[in-house]
Amino acid sequence: MRTEVSTYHMTAGDDGSPIQLLSPDGARHRHERYDRYLADVEGDDGAQLLVSLYEDMVVARRVDAEGTALQRQGQLGLWPPFVGQEAAQVGSARAVAADDFIFPSYREIGVAYVRGVALPDLVRQWRGNAHSGWDPYEFNMAPSQVVIGAHTLHAVGYAMGVQFDGAETAVVTYFGDGATSQGDVNESMVFAASYQAPVVFFCQNNQWAISEPVGLQAHVPIALRAPGFGIPSVRVDGNDVLACLAATREALERARSGNGPSYIEAVTYRMGPHTTADDPTRYRDANELEDWKERDPIARLERYLESRGLLDDEVRARVAAKADKVGAELREATIHMPDPAPEDVFAHVYAGPHAVLERQRDHYERYQSGLAGAHAEGGH
Amino acid sequence: MRTEVSTYHMTAGDDGSPIQLLSPDGARHRHERYDRYLADVEGDDGAQLLVSLYEDMVVARRVDAEGTALQRQGQLGLWPPFVGQEAAQVGSARAVAADDFIFPSYREIGVAYVRGVALPDLVRQWRGNAHSGWDPYEFNMAPSQVVIGAHTLHAVGYAMGVQFDGAETAVVTYFGDGATSQGDVNESMVFAASYQAPVVFFCQNNQWAISEPVGLQAHVPIALRAPGFGIPSVRVDGNDVLACLAATREALERARSGNGPSYIEAVTYRMGPHTTADDPTRYRDANELEDWKERDPIARLERYLESRGLLDDEVRARVAAKADKVGAELREATIHMPDPAPEDVFAHVYAGPHAVLERQRDHYERYQSGLAGAHAEGGH
Amino acid sequence: MTEQTAPNTSQMTFAKALNAGLRRAMERDSKVVLMGEDIGKLGGVFRITDGLQKDFGAHRVIDTPLAESGIMGTAIGMAYRGYRPVVEIQFDGFVYPAFDQIVAQVAKLHFRTLGRVKVPLTIRIPFGGGIGSPEHHSESPEAYFAHTAGLRVMAVSNPQDAYSMIQQAIACDDPVVFFEPKRRYHDKGDVDESFGLDAPDGLGMGSARVMAEGHDVTLVSYGPLVKTCLDAAVAASDEGVSVEVIDLRSLAPVDYATLEASVRKTGRLVIAHEASQSGGLGGEIAASITERCFYYLEHAPVRVTGFDVPYPYSKLEFHHLPDLDRILDGVDRALGRPNSLSGTEEGE
Amino acid sequence: MTEQTAPNTSQMTFAKALNAGLRRAMERDSKVVLMGEDIGKLGGVFRITDGLQKDFGAHRVIDTPLAESGIMGTAIGMAYRGYRPVVEIQFDGFVYPAFDQIVAQVAKLHFRTLGRVKVPLTIRIPFGGGIGSPEHHSESPEAYFAHTAGLRVMAVSNPQDAYSMIQQAIACDDPVVFFEPKRRYHDKGDVDESFGLDAPDGLGMGSARVMAEGHDVTLVSYGPLVKTCLDAAVAASDEGVSVEVIDLRSLAPVDYATLEASVRKTGRLVIAHEASQSGGLGGEIAASITERCFYYLEHAPVRVTGFDVPYPYSKLEFHHLPDLDRILDGVDRALGRPNSLSGTEEGE
Ligand SMILES: Cc1ncc(C[n+]2csc(CCOP(=O)(O)OP(=O)(O)O)c2C)c(N)n1
Ligand SMILES: Cc1ncc(C[n+]2csc(CCOP(=O)(O)OP(=O)(O)O)c2C)c(N)n1
Ligand SMILES: [Mg+2]
Ligand SMILES: [Mg+2]
């Protein structure tokens, strides 16, 4: 009597375990379905690509560490570390074409780095110098989204527009395990399935939503949610950069070929605090972190590269040097970032004129010049 | 590689067809899993119960027809017919215990009738005499809910309260196929699954949300949605009163025994317009209605009763007389329903005192008495 | 609204004028798409989009799943992609599930991106009461949006404005919440279709309009009550009181230049709206006009509004809704003529 | 706030006072449950619920899935069942997904059911800016709720009130939206815990409080700016200006009796809040006081508020937020003393 009526289902390993192409010890598992998306990392030709994935992950981790350090030193107001999620972010982002469009959450700084965003623009909003960093149209990547899940609908709408345009572009949206509980994220699946929009839902299940373990949001694997909406899903090891790359490539191919939305759950771990304002020792066990360290995404890729003889001291040194350089540049750029001007408070609220706001601006300018005068005179 | 990791799944017939215990021609299909919930309708002892189901359905249909007629005659402002959905409403409602709590949408007038709500209270809000009819605590049934899906969360919260109380009560919430797209309905499944709340989601998939066919909301069976949230579901023939009764009993049993939420999709059909303000000929094919008439829930039960020799002329006459009586009473009560008093505008906004509102009320009273005076004098 | 009947002018219902304006906007710009529940085959529950899906196709007139946050959020994504979505919210009371997308996304996106992303979204909302509807179908939520920086808010009162203002809203690069008084949908009026984006009298979308000139008191309203105010002005003139009636049209920003000029002349201000009084637009306008024209005011601005209650059931709605008599009473209060509060401090 | 230090009085942060008040309310009534994101083990991102889950259990202090509409909707269901849920919204900017449940359900349910269903819900919202946060973490959405009939709205400004008002809000049979000024969470003050539901000075939850007496001008505020206003009063007194500072405490309904009495005495009114000006509480209060005290007013009520902009990024937030100088400028304006608008009509 139990019948599977849907052609949509969750792909996973035995008992729902995540698909793994690289095990923590660096062994490469062959996979009937996903290997075809990894042809370009195979053989000697693949060396460069593999090393560049490694480089991106190492540099991304440095960017992240620098962000934390800058915050501790008072140069940033806040920082949301993504350490531990480099494979998920780099692996997926490297699958995305330049003219595909990305709608991230706030933690996808590794994705933005891969996308080529200038270093100061990675931290601009965390310094409080703006509400966003890069130009969305320059990088085909929306600004980071703080309201949990809200942007997943934007991604679907953009994908609907792509479809109406008859374009071959695809759209990727990133969100967390906690976000899956939001109405918006569920509605975005309804719309994506209804219009068969070319969108990829990329959930980084990093096990925690601030202090809440993923088990509070769902007792079943997160990836199981999508098939019920008519969206095929896959559960991948999010600390396995090859699995993330392959699954995203497959999903993008599906989107581009008119076969509608896909859902990827990347099972990973937030190795740092939620943000620099958070103290995870209040709610999580130190052992858990230790366990996950053994599954570190960078260490794993290193082992695999070593096993293929691709990681010698020279490569290591070159990548480390690049990380050092990027870190230093980011630090310099941050420290010397010019402050916004007071009148920017009033800028860009509207595209057109607005008499009431202009009057407030004028009054404030008048007030400020008066204040400057008063201060000069020593008045209050 | 395709793995079912969940113990939660959708129960349905072959290819996802709805579970049917009574076919349109009145034949009774045996069912391994659901028959045990129908022991009391079997054999001679079951006769009375079966006939009472029939009576409820017939009378409910008369209440509905009377509602439409009263609206056409200007006695009601609006009416949302449920004709065609009598099996889903009566079958499920008859499974619910008196101290279980029901959170309905606006169309569950058949459910309210089964619940024992006084006739005028079934139409009070549609006449504009109040925003609700019955006392929720008298009938353990919330007022009808107009905002699509909002009440499903109330049901889950109530069920959480039941659970914290350690009570054996269960909760049922009704909603439509269109409602399944709302964030709230999805969030309600998240919460119900997270806390394993004793709640039954009863979706009447009547194929339409005003002018929108169910295929716009989902390309897959509605009941497939729940397992992805960790909630077992079943797809039943919503025009089969026995299937609706059995599935609801099973779900309530699960709730009461601490096994958490369930989801029922009752596949039925809205034979009337969305409301009396709607003109379905603008958007749906007349043939569709004809097809569904062959699956009429009342005709089906009649055939089954006939086949069991339970529907003779006397029973028919008695039930028809009851329907006539209820219809006439409803009409009388409606036509003579006293208007609310003007000061009711200000009543029950707050449980406690509120100086600003009281001032407005005083001013309005003053205004009205002045107006009365002015009218007496022939002023404006 | 007093211009001569032009050759292209015809009598049209409010609903038909909106339909014609939408059609015109869609013809003008292929990026204009309509989104909403039941707007396709059915043409919307008020038939405002009647025939448009047939003529423009299902990609331009998009029936959406039943989820307002989803509609608004996907419309934002369409705007990112270069579209100009026009969203229909079926009834005022159903805009709240989309509230987060409107106030935290639609309103803030241009500011968030330092002007890089435009959100030329129009959110059409049939609003107000008076049609005997059930709960949630008669709300006046305009103050929520007028308080939200980043949005523009408009309300139309007559067919000609409906025709031109909907086009102006759609052409505007800022998001516009566009309120349509549902109880006026069947009212007829002259509509000159020879004007496209421009109004016949040249008024821009941000301008209020003096609907009737007068010198004793300024009576400001918008949407459904403009007609009631015009009727009140006629009734008052029978008693020798000259009322200047102003249709606000733009609720955010408010066209204070027009209001100030009038109040400087009359010295007295009455504001009428259906929404609850506390926190409604009336208070904002009263405060702003008091700030700007304190020494011209001969009486405190008077508000004639719905009460601070949830919209009542239909048998009582005409107690809640300001009508001609209540507005006249407000006018009398502003003028110090005998009124319902006479004898109290407020009524003098 | 001038009573003698009682034996039970101790210095406490605002945050700790709230925590103590919540604890007291939970002890008093076993039906009081707390719901929200991260309020359990973590004790909330501001630690307001610190230790409460440990002491009262996971059924009384409920970590919820990450969905605000879900939290609010299930809290309503709990209220139906006889509970008194206290919902924590993590930050002001995240209340909007719950807006529909608040305005269409929480606010209307008592009215909808003719008083049969009570919704004794308390919605705690840390609000306002000044702590250098990212977008959506510094909003002042109180006007949306104050405009919503059926809700009561409160804002606290100091630890003693935090302790007693949270208990009053929870004990109230109506739904209360309870605003806590997050930038004051670490401020310390005397808290007398010997009073439970009653405030030491006997003030009920609906009453405003005169925080400092004065006779030249009435300065009204609430939440985070009350402290700034008190500082401004001190600064003004150095210049010989006597400012009466009123903490509104109840934003809906507003305690007009207290405000009227003060304005009748001073003839001048300044209102300060962080929220955007248009449609903010300042306008409502200005309009209402003008209606009630027109002939006592010697100057138009003055508003000192945030601008009509989305809350700016943190490097600019102190331009947007009214500070001591801007408030003093407003006081000068109300008094006709030299001020930033001197020479214009508004500044005289
Ligand atoms: C609508 C909304 N509610 C609450 C928050 C506060 N908040 C910020 S991040 C976060 C947890 C998000 O968890 P998850 O989705 O798993 O993403 P992660 O932080 O783990 O990357 C919460 C509750 C928010 N930003 N938006
Ligand atoms: C939030 C919200 N949006 C829109 C509406 C308008 N509306 C009323 S009923 C309805 C269709 C509901 O369809 P469904 O859930 O299938 O229930 P049915 O009417 O078929 O019983 C719509 C769109 C509403 N009541 N609430
Ligand atoms: Mg997470
Ligand atoms: Mg339906």
Image (spheres, coloured by chain):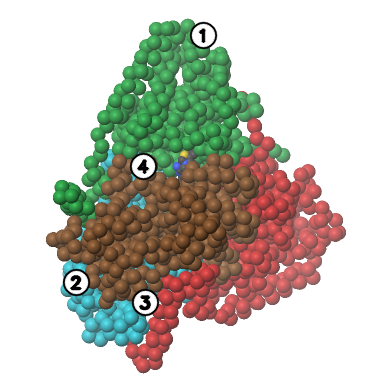
Chain colours: A green, B red, C cyan, D brown
User: Residue placed farthest to the left in the image?
Assistant: D343
Q: Quadrant of residue B233?
A: top right
Q: Position of residue C132 (x, y in %)?
A: 46, 71
Residue at mark 3 shares a chain with residue at mark 2: yes
| C18 displayed left or right of A303 | left
| Viewer-nearest of discs 2 and 1 | 2
Q: Spatial distance from mark 4 to mark 2, Cα to Cα? A: 41 Å
Q: Quadrant of residue D252?
A: bottom left
Asked whether disc 3 touches disc 2, contact meaning CB atoms under 8 Å apart, the reply is no
Can the viewer see residue C143 in this picture?
no
| Viewer-nearest of discs 1 and 4 | 4
Label 2: which secondary element: helix
Identity, as a three-letter code, of the amino acid under mark 2: Tyr
Give neighbour class at mark 3: few <14, some 14-19, many 20+ (Cα, 10 Å). many
Q: Earlier in the sequence, mark 3 or mark 2?
A: 2
Q: Nearer the viewer, residue A304 or B28?
A: A304
The tag on residue C323 is 3
Label 1: which secondary element: helix
The tag on residue C295 is 2
Which residue is labeled 1 in the image? A307
Q: Spatial distance from mark 1 to mark 4, Cα to Cα? A: 48 Å
Q: Chain of mark 2?
A: C
Vertical order, C313 against B227 (above or below)? below
